[in-house]
Amino acid sequence: MQVTMTVNGQEVTQEIEPRLLLVHFLRENLRLTGTHWGCDTSNCGACTVLMDGEPVKSCTVLAAMAGGHEVRTIEDMEQNGELDPVQVGFMEEHGLQCGFCTPGMIMTARALLDSNPNPSEEEIREAISGQICRCTGYVNIVKSVQWAAQHETVALPVETAS
Amino acid sequence: MQVPAPFEYERATSVDDALARLARLGSDARVIAGGHSLLPMMKLRLATPEHLVDINDLHDELGYVTEENGELRVGALTRHRELLESELLGRLFPIFHDAEKVIADPLVRNRGTIGGGLCQADPSEDLSAVCTAVKAKAVIRGGAGERTVEMDEFHRGPYETAVGDGEMLVEVRLPLREGAGSAYEKVERRAGDWAVGAAGVAVWMDAGTIVDAGVGLSALGAKAMRSPRAEDALRGQRPSEELFAEAGRMAAEDSNPTADQRGSAEYKRHLAAELTTRAVRRAVERALR
């Protein structure tokens, strides 16, 4: 079957098998490997992407179901050569260790701050409660999101950041 | 990699269109809404439908919480997040908000729907126990028209419901009655997990007496996820700690839990009693508020 969706602002049309999951469509068909493929059982949240602005677990959405919708992945966080404040927050507050959960955490944090610019610690913890950091670095992940909330207007050029 | 068995995918453009497709496809077809129960089962090949009819485009038709004719009407495609955000639902049936806060996690709640949860009919599903407690009615539509069934009839057993081939659940109706109070109590191993055990209770009070009660149990092996004996124990009584404990004992007797990695049968029976007792206490407090 043919599916058409918008991924990171660009319309894509592909011939797919109906059983193809969105996470594999993104990683294998579009080679957007920033979205990680973790537990495969909608438990870990490593595969989290935004669909119409809402975080969803892309291992439990058919690519066919995303047809006609807008999908945003970690690759789209950098805009015009500047990192998203959430990405900068993860650098500043050491929000990642192994980094496997990071893309998903960042997408959820972005959606949270878009709807609630000043979340409490409890609200941040609730927002990421469907995602697992196997390094158990939750304290710094929460701090990273708080940093981003406090610095929403600040953006770093990519070269400075890296 | 977990991949579902091959199937054909089609997308419904209206409820009538979905019903026409389901009628044509027969027993080989399943409706997919949020997909957070069905897709995991398809990945494990526990479910192998040959056709999926995607109803996510029908949100305008099937996603709502409205008050009408002495009932709260909830469209089958209303997502968990929307239930949690509905002030009307939380005010009239706080049991829904108790439950929604502990159903899976916010990401899953962005996709999952009330109709999907009820139709999956997992014996550990939370909203099934909630709907049983508040004496909800399920509106099932098919080519021949609509029929409305009580939750006892809706639940045919684990993963089985009254929804037949060529039919779909379109609405859940919650009767509004005076003096209502309701609450849900769940024990889970970690955030977002299925219940080890859970109890939902609704009471309706008049002049300090419980005139009617509903008790739903999740993951506890109760027939139709309900405890009729706990309901009988509460009906016509004035609230007291002794009464709450008695309702808990009856709920434990009506439950028939099995031991698994979440706990022993004995522990789950203890949960049936304790969680029912707590839920009745809180439901009564809310009814009297």
Image (cartoon, rainbow, N blue to C red):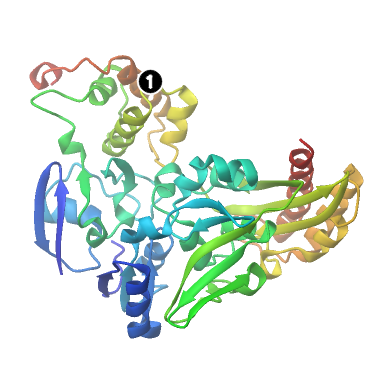
Which residue occupies 49% across, 27% down? A122
Task: Name the image quarter holding the N terminus of chain B.
Answer: bottom left
Q: Can residue A120 be seen in this view?
A: yes
B54 up-or-down from B69: above or below: below
Residue type at mark 1? Lys
Q: In which quarter of the image is residue A67?
A: bottom left
Query: Can residue B261 be seen?
Result: no
Quadrant location of the C terminus of chain B? top right
User: What chain does badge 1 belong to?
Assistant: A
Q: Is residue B53 above or below residue A41?
A: below
Q: Nearer the viewer, residue A101 or A114?
A: A114
Q: Which residue is drawn at 29% across and 74% down?
A: B5
Q: Is mark 1 on a helix, strand or loop?
A: helix
Residue indicated by mark 1: A143
**Residue B213 locus on image (x, y percent):** 78, 56
Q: Where is residue B148 in the image (x, y as percent from the top left)?
A: 58, 72
Above or below residue B160? Residue B35 is above
**Is A27 left or right of B217, judged from the image as shown?**
left
**Residue A156 percent across, percent down from the top left:** 15, 17
Q: In this view, does B11 lie to the left or right of A45?
A: left
